[in-house]
Image (cartoon, helix red, strand yellow):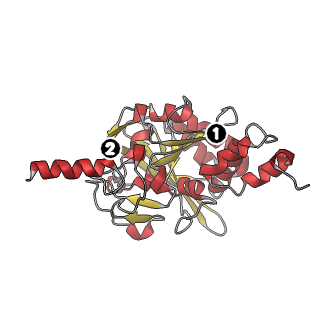
Amino acid sequence: MSPTARDLPSDIVAEVARFLPIDRLVQASFFPNAAPNVAQYELRQRIKDAIEPYIERTAFDDFIEYLRASEGAIVGSVVREVLLLNGPTQPRRKATNLNITTSFGMEGVMRSFLRSQGYRSRALPPSERRSSSVDVIERFDRRTPCETRTILLSVSATRALSVVLCTPYSAQMCAITHNSVVCMLPRATLANESLVVEGAPASSNAEDLTFSVIPNNSHWTSPCGLQCPATWRKTPDDDGAAIYSWSMDDGQFTSWGSVEDDGRSFLRSEPLIWRVHSRCHNDHCPNKVLFEDRSRYLRP
C-alpha cells in the first residue's frame, strides 16, 4: 500500500516544507504528523539564510533581539528574496546589501550591535534620502579578504512603518520584523511585479531594481479585492496585507488581516492612510467601472 499523508513522519513533512513557496508553506502545518511550528521553523531558516552574508548565524538571535529593541525591520531586496523563494518568479539578481530601518531615536542599539560585528559606519549626505520619512541614513561596511559587505541603516523620522510605505514602488512595501514577514501588496509582490506609486519622484536607479515595473494592473484576471491599488488603506486596520509569522512562540503561521498578532502590531505602530494609485485598470474590479462611470458623469 502506498504511503499517504497520514503515514508521513514529521521529518519528511519538514523536508517537504523546504520546497514550498511562502503562500503555501502554511499547508505543511496541516499534515497530521507535522510539528506544530513546522511552517514557522522553515521560514525562520529562510530568513537566516537570506541575511547570513551580512549577519553570521551565531549572531542571528542577538540581531533579531536588537531589531525588536530598535522597533525596526529589514526592508528591501532581502525581504523579497524570502518572499519569492520557491515561487514561480525570482528576483532578477541577488541582493547587494542589507537594508534595515528603525524608529526615530531607537537606532543606537542597532548601531552598537553592527559595530560589534566588525562593521564601520559613516552617515550618508542628505541627498541620499529619497523620502522625507527618513531622518538619517548610515552606511555600514565590513571588509573580508574576498569582498565588502554593506548594510544600510535608515532611521525613520517617525516609525519604521512610514519608511516601508513611503516608497515609490509597491514591491518595496514589505518588511521582516522580529517575528513576522509583512507584505502590503502580496498579489503583485509574489509575482515579482511592482506598480509605481502615483506622485512618487522618478527613480534614477531603475536598472538596479530586482523586480519588474509594470505600468498598471490591467493584466490581472480576477477582482482586486482588498489589494486594489485605487483603494485608500489605513495601517491600523489594513486587511489587505499578508502577514507570515516566523516566531516559534506564535501558534498561527499566517493571517490576512484577521488575527491579532505581532505583525498586526507593526501595522498599528503608526496611523497612516495610503494608496498606490488613483485609478484601477483591472477589468474585473468594480473600482475601475466606478472610476469610468464617475469620469463620464463629470466630463459628459
* Residue found 32% across the figure and 41% down from its top: 232
Q: Mark 2 is on which residue type? A: Thr
Q: Position of residue 21 (x, y in %)?
A: 63, 55
* Residue found 43% across the figure and 46% down from its top: 164
Q: Mark 1 is on which residue type? A: Phe
Structural crowding at the residue carrying mark 1, measured as other residues with C-alpha within 10 Å and reported as few (<14), some (14–19) or many (≥20): many
Left-right relation of 261 to 159:
right
Q: Position of residue 289 (x, y in %)?
A: 26, 51
- Residue farthest to the left? 300
- Total marks in image: 2
Q: Earlier in the sequence, mark 1 or mark 2?
A: 2
* Residue found 72% across the figure and 42% down from its top: 29
| Mark 1 lies on residue | 253
Q: Secondary structure at mark 1?
A: loop
Q: Is residue 111 above or below residue 211?
A: above
Q: Position of residue 45 (x, y in %)?
A: 70, 50
Q: Secondary structure at mark 2?
A: loop
Quadrant placement of the N terminus: bottom right
| Mark 2 lies on residue | 231
